[in-house]
Amino acid sequence: MRTDAVRGHLDGLLLAVLEDGPLHGYAIIAAVQTRSRGALELRTGTIYPALNRLERLGLLSSSWQAEGERRRRAYALTEDGRRTLAGERTAWNEFTAAIGSVLNPAAPPGLPT
């Protein structure tokens, strides 16, 4: 899938994979890739600035966690992040419905198909 296809939807993707609980950066990348069945591959240079921005906006919180001998920053949704995610889902559904109605138009009611 084209990298530019993710533009404008990255925040929603990040918030969605954090809905079930805190994850560190590489786990977020893996979750997006798993949920998209390999269609989306995010780069660390893309997600870390976005995670930092979402944290500054109050949509995420972060904390350091030990994983083996490594320390990693784990990100979690805040209540504002959950509300924003709900809005992102609504906007996505409206967007895909509008695009779908253009790309795959249904025959107007009453007209022969």
Image (cartoon, grey):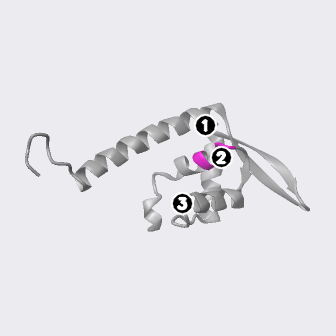
Mark 2 or 1: in front is 2
Residue 70 in the image: above or below residue 52: below
Magenta-span inclusion, residue 17: yes
**For marks 3 and 1 on the same chain, the one whose residue lies earlier in the sequence:** 3
Residue 86 horizontal/vertical position (percent): 52, 36
Residue 103 horizontal/vertical position (percent): 25, 56
Magenta-span inclusion, residue 32: no
Q: What residue is disc 2 on?
A: 18
Q: Secondary structure at mark 1?
A: helix
Q: Residue at x 36, y 48 (%)?
A: 96
* Amino acid at circle 1: Gly
Mark-to-mark CA distance, 2 and 1: 10 Å
Q: Secondary structure at mark 3?
A: loop
Task: Using the rendered view, name the quadrant where residue 110 is placed.
Answer: top left
* Amino acid at circle 3: Ser
Task: Using the rendered view, name the quadrant where residue 111 is placed.
Answer: top left
Q: Secondary structure at mark 2?
A: loop
Q: Contact (CB < 8 A) between labels 2 and 1?
A: yes
Mark-to-mark CA distance, 3 and 2: 15 Å
Residue 81 numbered mark, or none: 1
Q: What residue is disc 3 on?
A: 36
